[in-house]
Amino acid sequence: KKEVKYGQLTELPRQDEAMKKWRSNRFGQFIHWGLYAIPGGIWEGKTYKYAAEFLKSSAGISTATWDSLQYQFNPVKFDAKEWAKMAKDMGVKYVTITTKHHEGFCLWPSKYTDFDIENTPYRKDLLGEFIKAYNEEGIDVSLYYSVLDWHHPDWRYKLNTEEDKAAFERLKAFTENQLLELLERYPTVKGLWFDGTWDQCWKDNGKFSYDLEKKLKEKNPGLIVNSRMRADEYGSRHFDSNGVLMGDYESGYERRLPNPWDVAVTKNDWECCMTIPENQWGYHKDWTLTHIKTSNELIEMLVQCTSQNGNFLLNFGPRGEGNFREKEVKLAKEIGDWMDDNSSVIYNCGYAGLKKQSWGYFTKSSDSDDAINMVVFNKPINGKYRVKLNKGSIIKRAYLLSKPKKSFNLEEIANGEYFLDDVKGKCKDPFVIIIELEDKD
Ligand SMILES: C#C[C@@H]1N[C@@H](C)[C@@H](O)[C@H]1O
């Protein structure tokens, strides 16, 4: 074991109220919005297939040219209340929005740069309007912040020379000032979601990331930060050099999920962030380039995350003018309709302590020990659901969440193992079977 002085700051898993709320939220909305939403993946008539928020590098655009987009950023269709209502109806309990992506443009009026919303035709504190509207809908707000900053003259990927090191010291001070400014301006914020921390410059500054986590948590007690913020003094990221998780939850699942049978993942808090297209976080004009996920695919990801003690952060990329594409609005509605009937198997739920089975996923509410949720995605062709519980478990009753009066027939086939006879006819959406257990004692 290495001696790690600048590794985990807060003992995990956190059991304070702020973290319990984060855990019970389970379902969040990610918003990627910045200057990249104006060109939307197309530059001088050419469509670039790579992620739209990387268009500056994909199309080799100079910083001066890219930054001039600031004078076109005028989201006349932006209605924060409308956005918050859509999120509320979709069933999310929290939102994470990009305050500043890799391009360096800030959605809030920052004292530390002119490359911000104040110097656009919009002028107003867009981020403040956003936070107020989402909080009024009862949705917690977390802020995404990219340490990687293509606009800032002091950004360096690697620190080769003394000049590089002096420049990066200034970048670190700028980063700390902006983050403290965000927490000062927006005190209701529950978390910070760090990104752009994969370069050598950050790995060489593990102690700084430790001290910064400490300072930010002193400024906003209860603040929740993702593991992506951190490096230890040896350059190990997310987990320190002895494999101990840093930050408050693991945030390495980006556009991918763990193996659904993996039990080890349940021991930490974690979050998966997911795009609707294959790889577009910012708005891209052309959604014919890749597969666009259906609401049932996205609902299954949300249920899988919950079944393994993880949160699911689903991304939306609004247009430069401030509205969402119709397909995103439709998906939000479809997911919200499912959540209207089934959110009880998501909110405040997690790993049921049972091996996953082929019909779908188990989840269990933190508030009850004698009920288990079966969320069905794959109907068995023989109409019988094989349910393997822990030894000694006895099913008192099993029924559809949607039809609680009608019980399934039970056939016990071994200790803690049953067949449930199907009582449901045709179904096009995922559905829930509630298993009520006999009290053990
Ligand atoms: C790569 C990369 C970035 N990380 C995701 C969360 C998006 O912000 C993407 O641009």
Image (tube, rainbow, N blue to C red):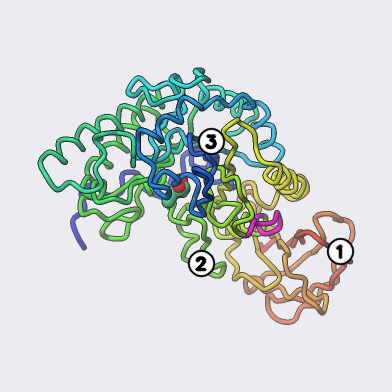
In the foreground, 36 or 349? 36
Residue 441 vertical position relative to residue 325 in the rendered view, above or below: below
Residue picked out by circle 1: 407
* Amino acid tagged 2: Val
In the foreground, 69 or 118? 69
Asked which quadrant contains residue 277, the reply is bottom right
Q: Are marks 3 and 1 in contact (CB under 8 Å)?
A: no
Residue 402 % position (x, y): 83, 54
Q: Which of pointers 3 and 1 indicates the residue nearer the eye?
A: 3
Residue picked out by circle 2: 263
* Amino acid tagged 3: Ile
Marks 3 and 1, Cα distance to the nearest angstrom? 54 Å
* Amino acid tagged 1: Ser
Q: Which of pointers 2 and 3 indicates the residue nearer the eye?
A: 3
Q: Quadrant of the C terminus?
A: bottom right
Residue 351 vertical position relative to residue 280 in the rendered view, above or below: below
Q: Are marks 2 and 3 in contact (CB under 8 Å)?
A: no
What segment is highlighted magenta in the picture? Answer: 291-298
Local secondary structure at mark 1: strand
- Whether the residue under disc 2 has CB within 8 Å of ligand 1: no
Identity of the residue drawn at 86% across and 64% down:
407
Identity of the residue drawn at 39% across and 34% down:
65
Asked which quadrant contains residue 216, the reply is top left
Local secondary structure at mark 3: loop
Local secondary structure at mark 2: loop
Q: How many marks?
A: 3
Marks 2 and 1, Cα distance to the nearest angstrom? 30 Å
- Circle nearer the N terminus (2, 3): 3
- Circle nearer the N terminus (2, 1): 2
Residue picked out by circle 3: 38
User: Which residue is farthest left?
Assistant: 162
- Classed neighbour count for the residue bearing mark 1: other residues with Cα under 10 Å, few (<14), some (14–19), many (≥20): some
